[in-house]
Image (cartoon, grey):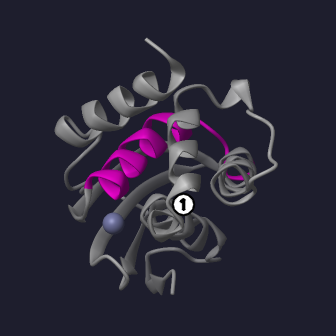
Amino acid sequence: MDLKDLYRDVILDHNRNPRNFGPLPSASADAEGFNPLCGDRLNLHLRVVDERVEDVRFEGQGCAISTASASLMTEAIKGKTRAEALALFERVHALLTEDAAPADESLGKLCALSGVREFPARVKCASLCWHTLASALNSPEPRSVPAVSTE
Ligand code: ZN
């Protein structure tokens, strides 16, 4: 199995069985994201306590890439501090958009998202949840922040 097959399997798996999918009644921040190019909609729920992401869940409807990306993201940021989660956003954004970006092995399963670089129209599908996360984490008094659009 080559790397491409592995990446595809990770995406398919997370689309079929999204991790951390559902409401989060104890959320301290909620953010909405919409990708008009594809129609992906995302509601992200975060529970941030003492600058740490204690829990994260997402809801919404989108294509396989957007669902898998959100699922992978929730796994990756749970337990991280706000600063660590924002740093991860920067690294994933580079992974998705910079052709010359070297494969960052420390990103682990998130590397599966690098496949979208071959399909520019899908980059926004993969980055939607990350932009939504950044907007939720950057909002000073997060409770409900306005919808972000990646357009
Ligand atoms: Zn999409």
Q: Position of residue 117 (x, y in %)?
A: 59, 54
Magenta residues span 64-83
Q: Position of residue 51 (x, y in %)?
A: 66, 51
Look at 74% across and 33% down and name the residue there: 103
Q: In this figure, which residue is indicated by the disc labeled 1?
A: 130
Q: Position of residue 101 (x, y in %)?
A: 80, 46
Near-viewer residue (32 or 15): 15
Look at 22% across and 65% down and name the residue there: 60
Residue 81 among those drawn in magenta: yes
Quadrant of the image where one finds ligand 1: bottom left
Residue 79 among those drawn in magenta: yes
Main SS of the magenta part reads: helix
Left or right of 119, for residue 21: left
Q: In the displayed structure, would residue 36 be above or below residue 70?
A: below
Left or right of 72, for residue 60: left
Q: In the displayed structure, would residue 35 be above or below residue 51?
A: below
**Quadrant of the rendering where the N terminus is positioned:** top left
Mark yes or no: residue 43 visible.
no
Q: Quadrant of residue 31?
A: bottom left
Q: Position of residue 39 (x, y in %)?
A: 27, 78
Near-viewer residue (37 or 27): 37
| Amino acid of disc 1 | Trp
Look at 25% across and 40% down and name the residue there: 18
Look at 47% across and 67% down and name the residue there: 128
Left or right of 41, for residue 44: right
Q: Residues within 10 Å of mark 1 (few under 14, many from 20)?
A: many
